[in-house]
Structure formats: structure tokens, C-alpha cells
């Protein structure tokens, strides 16, 4: 039975990846940090099938112990401070969690089990103020946020450990991917949750930032399969994972509101609080290498993804509201 260690397992991607690896017969170990209120919402269905290890990205001793306990064939390093907007008010924490911690994790693997295969969660945010379109593995980076800068460090340190220590270390340069498990602060989920609340009469406006930003949005469930495929190859390498389509935030609003029979223009208010100090205007990925070498493909398209998210939020908000009415 293969053994995998996942950091960031309670997040969106970690939860889909855990389900995917369990379905493939893996023994899955999940690194969990101590929080005042435990949050297992994303991993509810598989919580009891995961072997939990207490640890924190910033604590090398705990990561060494996590690798020792799990004795993994594969390590998926997904944990990070992942919200771009939070990286301006918290640039140092973002640097520690999203950049330096990658070296912590690589060191833990190098010291305890250098033969383990390593996946690093790199990001299209590294392309930032893009210098070519579409963006591919060879496109130079021009990050536009403390988060993007931190991810560039994480990306290059992964390449460096591969080249310095001959480790099987891969970087997946993943474009935005979403799901009903996406954090509520990210734009797709903010919109699907907002639409559900407006439709149910619980909210009357949705305050948004830049509606002209363009993103290449895919489904997280499809993207975790690419992570696994990268670690099954003969040689370690880096891959762009994307849909090859780009859509604006405005289009996202149109699709989500019209799905429930509403016109977004009647509810959306532009609020400078959600406009960023520096914006990534356009992301559009070319994932030909992943298609060709990994045989990776997408199952869920943009409209289907947004409608799935609105459906799930309608169900959840309705249930929460009914429970509240019953109690009060
Ligand atoms: P997410 O939902 O925000 O999950 C982040 C995970 O990191 C959570 O499990 C969180 O634990 C954990 N974490 C944060 N700080 C930690 C610490 N100090 N010690 C241990 N664990 C810690 O992110 P995601 O969307 O699944 O993304 C996964 C990874 O892919 C991230 O590295 C992200 O930057 C990268 N990425 C994401 C996308 C995307 O579109 N989703 C695209 C490219 C790259 P808690 O539950 O305790 O907070
Ligand atoms: O959903 P977002 O917050 O995602 P962003 O910044 O693209 O980052 C996500 O994708 C990256 C991959 O490219 C990951 F590395 C990263 O971890 C994260 O998962 O914002 C998307 C766009 C931005 O242009 C933002 O300015 O939506 C725009 N936007 C407009 N109004 C908004 C809002 N974003 C948020 N979060 N909230 C708004 O009200």
C-alpha cells in the first residue's frame, strides 16, 4: 500500500486530494495545525480514514517528525497562506508560510526520506503582470503581490532541491481552481454564496472589487489528479495546469446571477476595499505539456463549475437558515 503525506489537507485541494488518494488505495497522512476551533468541514466524509499528525509549516521539528511517522512514498505540500489579498496586510507571515516553509518541508524530506516524491503547489500568480499570453512553463515570472513573490521562492527552491540533491521534486503551476469547498473570501465562492443569500432573501447587495480581471478558472477535483500524475512519471518536472479559457469577474457574475434568474447589475456594488494595490489583469494558461506528457484532461467546464457552486451554496444556506428558524 502506497503512503502519502499531505500538508494543507483541511483546505480545498487537500480534501479533494485525500479523497482521490484514498480511492486509489493509499494510506493517507494529514498534517494538521493546532487551531482554537478544529475545522474538518472539507474532510468530513474521510476524516476517520486519515491518519492525523500534529504539526505546523513553520516548525521544522514537527515536519521532520511528520515525515518520520508517515514514512511517505509521496509528499504533497499544499499548505500555505493562500489568499492573495491577505498578503499585503500580512507580507511577513505570507513570506514565512508560503515561501520559507517550502524549504522547511523540503529539508524534512531530505533529512528523513530523500527518496520520497515531492509535489509543490506553485501558482499562476507567479506570472502576475504577464509577459506573454498564454502562459506556459517557460514564461518568465513577474509576481504582483507578496503572495506571488513568496510562491516564486517556493517554486525555485523546489527546482533547486531537485537539481542539488537529485530529489524527485515537482512543481505544479496551477491556475485558479474552485469548488464548493473554496474559502468564502475567494471571488468565485464569494459570488456563489452571495447569489444564494440574495436569492433566498437573506442579503440585498454584493460588494465587489475589480470586475474586469480575467482568470483561467477550473474545477479543483480535476486539478488534484494532475498533482498525482506528476508524481507517477519517470522523471520529475514542472507543469502548467489550466483550462485554456479565460473569463472576467463580470462574466462570473453574469453566469451566477442569471442561473437563479437575477440580473447582477441590480445587486453588485463596487467597493474600493476589495480593489488590490496591484492587480493581475489577465491569466490564461497553456497546459499542452501536461496534456501530452501526463495525459491529463479536464472534466468540468467554467459554466458547469459556477452552477455547481451556486447549487451547493443554495442547499447549504437554505439548510443553515432552516436550522436557525427552528431554534429561534
Ligand atoms: P486553502 O484552502 O487556503 O488551504 C490552505 C491549507 O494550508 C489549509 O489546510 C490550512 O490549514 C493550511 N495551513 C495554513 N497555514 C498552515 C500552517 N502554518 N501549518 C500547517 N498548515 C497550514 O488553499 P487551496 O486553495 O487548497 O490551495 C492549496 C495550495 O495550492 C496552496 O499552497 C495555494 O497557495 C496553492 N494554489 C492554489 C490555487 C487555487 O486556485 N486554489 C492555485 C495555485 C496554487 P487550516 O485549515 O488550519 O487553515
Ligand atoms: O479569487 P481571488 O481572490 O483569487 P486570486 O487572487 O486569483 O488567487 C487565487 O488563485 C491563485 C492562482 O492564480 C492562487 F495561487 C491563489 O492561492 C488563489 O487561490 O481573486 C480573483 C480575481 C482578482 O483579480 C480579484 O481582484 O477576482 C478579483 N476580485 C474582484 N472582486 C475579487 C473581488 N476577489 C476577491 N477575493 N473578492 C472580491 O470582492
Image (spheres, rainbow, N blue to C red):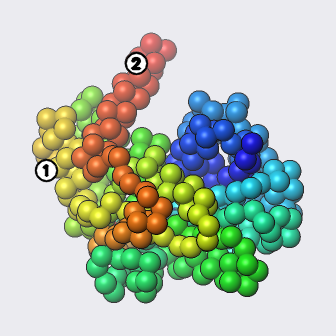
Q: Residues within 10 Å of mark 1 (few under 14, many from 20)?
A: few
Instruction: Examine the rendering and report whether any part of residue 11 can be seen.
Output: no
- Residue ID at (81%, 50%): 70
* Label at residue 220: none
Q: Nearer the viewer, residue 264 or 130?
A: 130
Quadrant of picture, ligand 1: bottom right
Q: Residue furthest top?
A: 326
Q: Is residue 57 left or right of residue 125?
A: right
Numbered tag placed on residue 265 in the rendering? 1
**Element type where label 2 sits in the image:** helix
| Residue identifier under label 2 | 322
Q: Residue at x 20, y 58 (%)?
A: 250
Q: Residue 124 location in percent, x, y? A: 43, 71
In the rendered image, residue 287, in percent from the top left (x then y), is placed at 38, 67
Residue 232 or 145: which is nearer the viewer? 232
Residue at 24% from the left image edge and 53% from the top image edge: 252
Which of 165/123 is in front? 165
Q: Are marks 2 and 1 in contact (CB under 8 Å)?
A: no
Q: CA distance from mark 2 to mark 1?
A: 28 Å
Q: Earlier in the sequence, mark 2 or mark 1?
A: 1
Amino acid at each position: 500500500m502506497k503512503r502519502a503525506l499531505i500538508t494543507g489537507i483541511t483546505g480545498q485541494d487537500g480534501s479533494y486530494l485525500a479523497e482521490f488518494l484514498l480511492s486509489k488505495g493509499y494510506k493517507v497522512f494529514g498534517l494538521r495545525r493546532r487551531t482554537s476551533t478544529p475545522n474538518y468541514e472539507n474532510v468530513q466524509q474521510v476524516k476517520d480514514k486519515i491518519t492525523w499528525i500534529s504539526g505546523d509549516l513553520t516548525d521544522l521539528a514537527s515536519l521532520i517528525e511528520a515525515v518520520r511517522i508517515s514514512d511517505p512514498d509521496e509528499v504533497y505540500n499544499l499548505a500555505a497562506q493562500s489568499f492573495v489579498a491577505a498578503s499585503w496586510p500580512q507580507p511577513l507571515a505570507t513570506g514565512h508560510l508560503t515561501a520559507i516553509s517550502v524549504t522547511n518541508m523540503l529539508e524534512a524530506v531530505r533529512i528523513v526520506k530523500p527518496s520520497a516524491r515531492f509535489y509543490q503547489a506553485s501558482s499562476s500568480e507567479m506570472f502576475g503582470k504577464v509577459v506573454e499570453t498564454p502562459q506556459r512553463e517557460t514564461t518568465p515570472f513577474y509576481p504582483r503581490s507578496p503572495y506571488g513573490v513568496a510562491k516564486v521562492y517556493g517554486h525555485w527552491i523546489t527546482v533547486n532541491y531537485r537539481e542539488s540533491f537529485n530529489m524527485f521534486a515537482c512543481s505544479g503551476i496551477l491556475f485558479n481552481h474552485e469548488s464548493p469547498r473554496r474559502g468564502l473570501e475567494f471571488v468565485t465562492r464569494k459570488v456563489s454564496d452571495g447569489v444564494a443569500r440574495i436569492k433566498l432573501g437573506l442579503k440585498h447587495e454584493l460588494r465587489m472589487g475589480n470586475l474586469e480581471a480575467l482568470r483561467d478558472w477550473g474545477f479543483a477535483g480535476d486539478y488534484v489528479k494532475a498533482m498525482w500524475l506528476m508524481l507517477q512519471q519517470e522523471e520529475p518536472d514542472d507543469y502548467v495546469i489550466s483550462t485554456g479559457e479565460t473569463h472576467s469577474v463580470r462574466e462570473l457574475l453574469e453566469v451566477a446571477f442569471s442561473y437563479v434568474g437575477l440580473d447582477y447589475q441590480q445587486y453588485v456594488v463596487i467597493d474600493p476595499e476589495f480593489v488590490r494595490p496591484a492587480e493581475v489583469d489577465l491569466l490564461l494558461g497553456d497546459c499542452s505539456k501536461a496534456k501530452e506528457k501526463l495525459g491529463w484532461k479536464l472534466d468540468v467546464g467554467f459554466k458547469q463549475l459556477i452552477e455547481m457552486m451556486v447549487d451547493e451554496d443554495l442547499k447549504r444556506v437554505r439548510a443553515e437558515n432552516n436550522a436557525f428558524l427552528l431554534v429561534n
